[in-house]
Amino acid sequence: MSRPAETALYAPLKAHLEGLGFTVKSEVAGVDIVAMPGGPQAEGEPVLIEMKTGFSLTLFHQAIARQSVSDAVYVAVPRGQGRAFQKALKANLTLCRRLGIGLLTVRLEDGFVEVHADPGPYRPRMAARRKAGLLREFAARAGDPNVGGSRGQVVTAYRQDARRLLAHLSAHGASKGSEVAKATGVARATAIMAANHKGWFRRVARGVFEATPEGLAELAEAMAAQTDA
């Protein structure tokens, strides 16, 4: 299914703006749509709209450039359907808010225009729990075992701790959690082995654990990676 032309957005957007009392003209000084409150000679902040058939970096480049002319800049795209569009809409709505740009969508079937965001300053709320988790992981991770930008397996602080436990169990056999914690320096040793999120440990008695074949395979893989490094 081909994308609609940008021109298909113009009539619905013009009707929407005129319904709000704006005078609307297209292609003024390179701007797709310029709307002035009241009559054509009225004074006030012009509303500038850049249209595209979909979200793109070019669309945002144009909108940012228009912010040197007006504080009231919008981007407009056709309203799509399905999860892919909803995901793109959510991500680009966040971007618009960050940039202080308004966002409009046009449902081409009936010309309905929806305002998702108006232009204006935006200060995002800090995600305190996510920040705390990031700092906790940074502090707990030993060294820098990953390569930035890679899409392979990420070595987390949890994985590093689990590998220390597996190394101890591989060398000493089934052991008490307290003994493993003391020997490896991993304070949460018992909790990690009891939770067994990866299937690497098996409890053989109260407070006593051993490594599973899967755990030993994980340890072997880690040791091989160190040899190759």
Image (cartoon, grey):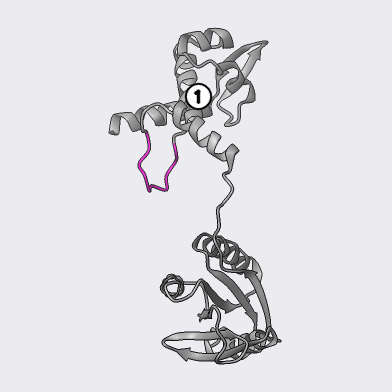
**Residue 4 falls in image quadrant:** bottom right
The quadrant holding residue 154 is: top left
Residue 13, placed above or below residue 137: below
Tell me the chief SS of the magenta region: loop
Q: Which residue does the numbered mark 1 point to in the structure image? A: 162
Please state the total of marks drawn on the protein image: 1
The front one of 176 and 136 is 136
Q: Nearer the viewer, residue 138 or 48?
A: 48
Q: Secondary structure at mark 1?
A: helix
x%, y% of residue 52? 50, 80
Boundaries of the magenta span: 145-154
Q: Residues within 10 Å of mark 1 (few under 14, many from 20)?
A: many
Q: Amino acid at mark 1?
A: Ala
Q: Position of residue 59 (x, y in %)?
A: 46, 74
Q: Is residue 217 left or right of residue 22?
A: left
Q: Nearer the viewer, residue 123 or 174?
A: 123
Whether residue 176 is visible: no
Q: Residue at the spot x=40%, y=29% of the render?
A: 222
Horizontally, is 56 left or right of 106 in the view? left
Q: Is residue 103 visible?
A: yes
Q: What x and y, as percent, mark residue 105?
A: 62, 76
* 29 relative position to 97: left or right: left
